[in-house]
Amino acid sequence: MEHAPLIYGSLMAGIDVLSLGLLKAIHLQWISPYFFAIPVLIYACQPVLFLKSLSYEGLSVMNMMWDLLSGVFVTILGLYFFKEKITIKKFVGILLSILSIYLLTS
């Protein structure tokens, strides 16, 4: 499966978005701290996906794919859902992450 690394990386990054988004909501007191167990349990599923992803790509590439996609997806969450701001310099870094994802998948 040619796109498996991108798919698995996206799934793992999606887990990061959900977990980190819930933690940010707890931090902002939008939801109760009692919900802390939910991101922990969700994040505990990630090693299973990572293990499966290693059938399609090596450790270094899969870890980089996961990290880059997570950074881009979590940044989008922060910008649009939590109304965070980033500098131009950081935006360029995000664009370079997207370029890196492209290079890793080609």
Image (cartoon, helix red, strand yellow):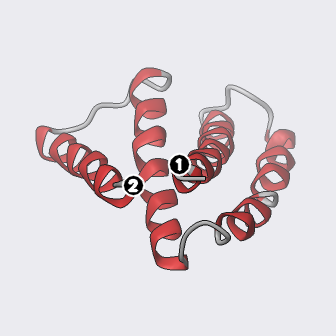
Residue at 55 percent of width and 78 percent of height: 59
Q: CA distance from mark 1 to mark 2?
A: 8 Å
Neighbour class for label 1 at 10 Å: few (<14), some, many (≥20)? few
Where disc 1 sits, the SS reads: loop
> What residue type is disc 1 on?
His
Q: Position of residue 83 (x, y in %)?
A: 40, 23
Q: Which mark is residue 97?
A: none
> Does the residue at mark 1 contact the one at mark 2 (Cβ under 8 Å)?
yes
Which residue, given by chain and number where applicable, does mark 1 sit on? 3
Nearer to me, 30 or 85? 85
Q: Is residue 63 left or right of residue 21?
A: left
Residue at 45 percent of width and 49 percent of height: 69
Which residue, given by chain and number where applicable, does mark 2 sit on? 105
Residue 68 is drawn in which quadrant? bottom left
Q: Is residue 66 left or right of residue 35?
A: left
Q: From what the image shows, is residue 99 above or below residue 66?
A: above
